[in-house]
Amino acid sequence: MSLTIPKFTLPFSSPARKCLTCIAQLTNVPASITSTPSVSVGRREGLFFLTAVATTVAQQLPSLSKSWALVLEAEDDLELLEKVKNDRKKRLERQGVINSSAAETGYLQDLVYKLSRVGLAIEKSDLSAASSVLGPSTNVDWVQNVNKAFTKLSSSPEQKTEAGEFSSSFASLFSSVSKQDVEASKVAFVSSASTLEKWIDMTGLNGQIKGL
C-alpha cells in the first residue's frame, strides 16, 4: 500500500526543512518533498504528511540500525587488520636491526658475564675482585661499547628510558665498589641487573643474550 503525500515544503530557512531533508535521505520518502519551493497547505494535510513521514521512519529503523551495526563491524575488522599488519611490520623491522647488530649483542653478552662475576664477588664481600672486573670507571672501553649497544638497540621511548635507568644504576655500582661500600654495592648491583633484564625483555633480545 502506497501513500500519496501532498507536495509540501517548509521555507528554506526553517530548521524543520533541514530535518526533513535528512529523513528523506535515510528513508524511502521522496526527496522532492524537501526540495520543492514553499507552498501553503492546510493544517490537516500538514499533520497527515508528518504522520506519514514518522511512520515510514519508524518502519525502517530496525533495518537502518542493523545496516549501521554491520558498517561499524566492518570498520572494526579493518582497523584490527591494519593493526596486525603494522605490528608485524614493526616486528620484522626490529628483527632486522637485531640481526645486523652482532657486535652490539656481543657487547651485551660480555656485560652479562661481567655482572655475574661482580655479583659473586659482592656476595663474598670481595669488592677488590669486583673492582678488577669492572675497571677503574665507566670510561673504560668495554663500558663505552655497552653504551653504544644500548643506543643502537633502544628504539622506543620506554626502551630508552630503561636504558637510562640501567646506566644510572651501573654508575652507582662503579662508585659503590670503588668506595668499598658493600651494602651500597649490593643495592646498585640488584638495580643494575633488574633494569638490564627488563630492557633485554623489552627489546626482544632474550634469544640472543644468555645467562640472565
Image: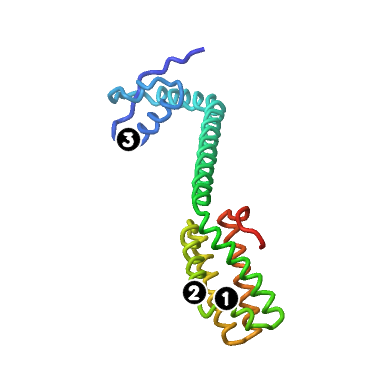
Label 3 residue SS: loop
Precedes in sequence: disc 2 or disc 1: 1
Give the image location of residue 114, x and y in percent: 61, 70
> Image point 58% across, 83% down: which residue?
176
Precedes in sequence: disc 2 or disc 3: 3
Q: Amino acid at mark 3?
A: Ser
Give the image location of residue 144, x and y in percent: 47, 69
The crowd level at tag 3 (other Cα within 10 Å; few <14, some 14-19, many 20+) is few
Give the image location of residue 115, x and y in percent: 62, 70
> Image point 51% across, 25% down: which residue?
55
Precedes in sequence: disc 3 or disc 1: 3
Residue 7 quadrant: top left
| Residue at mark 1 | 134
In-image side of 11 versus 160 (left or right): left
Q: Amino acid at mark 1?
A: Leu
Is there CB contact under 8 Å for labels 2 and 1? yes
